[in-house]
Image (cartoon, rainbow, N blue to C red):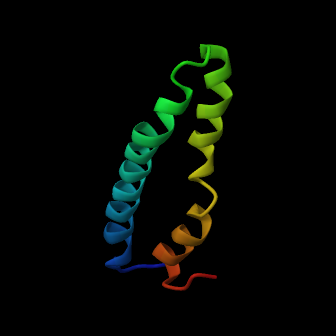
C-alpha cells in the first residue's frame, strides 16, 4: 500500500478529464451530424456504445497512475 502521494495521480486525473472532454467534443462535432436525423431509439444504442468505449484503455491508465508501470 502506498503511503506517500505521487505526482502521477493528479496528473492522471487531469489527463483523464482532458481526454474525456476531447473525446466528447470529437463525438459531438463529427459523429452527431451523421446520426442526428435518426430516430431517438436508433440513436440510443449508438450513444450507449460510445459512452462505454472510452473505458477500454482505462485499466492500463489506472495501473500507471498507481504503480508507474503500464502492465
Residue visible at 60% across and 64% down? 57
Residue sitting at the far bottom: 69
At 59% from the left and 41% from the top, the residue drawn is 50
Can the viewer see residue 60 in this picture?
yes
Q: What residue is at 51 percent from the left and 82 percent from the top?
A: 67
Q: For the point 59% across and 54% down, which residue is it?
A: 55
Total label count? 0
Which of the 4 image quadrants contains residue 30?
top left
Residue 60: x %, y % from top left: 59, 71
**Where the C terminus falls, by quadrant?**
bottom right
Q: Is residue 1 among what the camera can see?
A: no
Q: In this view, does 22 lie above or below 13?
A: above
Residue closest to the eye, 29 or 16: 29
Residue 52 x/y as whole percent: 62, 44
Residue 43 position within the rendered picture, expressed as x and y whole percent measured from the top left: 61, 24
Q: Nearer the viewer, residue 25 or 8?
A: 25
Counting from the top left corner in percent of width and height, residue 10 is at 32, 67
Position of 15 with respect to 47 (left or right) is left
Question: Which of 5/66 is in front?
Answer: 66
Amino acid at each position: 500500500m502506498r503511503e506517500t502521494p505521487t505526482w502521477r495521480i493528479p496528473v492522471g486525473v487531469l489527463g483523464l478529464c482532458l481526454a474525456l472532454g476531447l473525446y466528447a467534443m470529437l463525438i459531438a462535432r463529427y459523429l452527431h451530424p451523421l446520426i442526428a436525423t435518426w430516430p431517438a431509439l436508433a440513436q440510443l444504442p449508438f450513444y450507449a456504445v460510445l459512452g462505454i468505449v472510452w473505458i477500454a484503455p482505462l485499466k492500463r491508465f489506472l495501473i500507471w497512475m498507481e504503480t508507474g508501470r503500464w502492465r
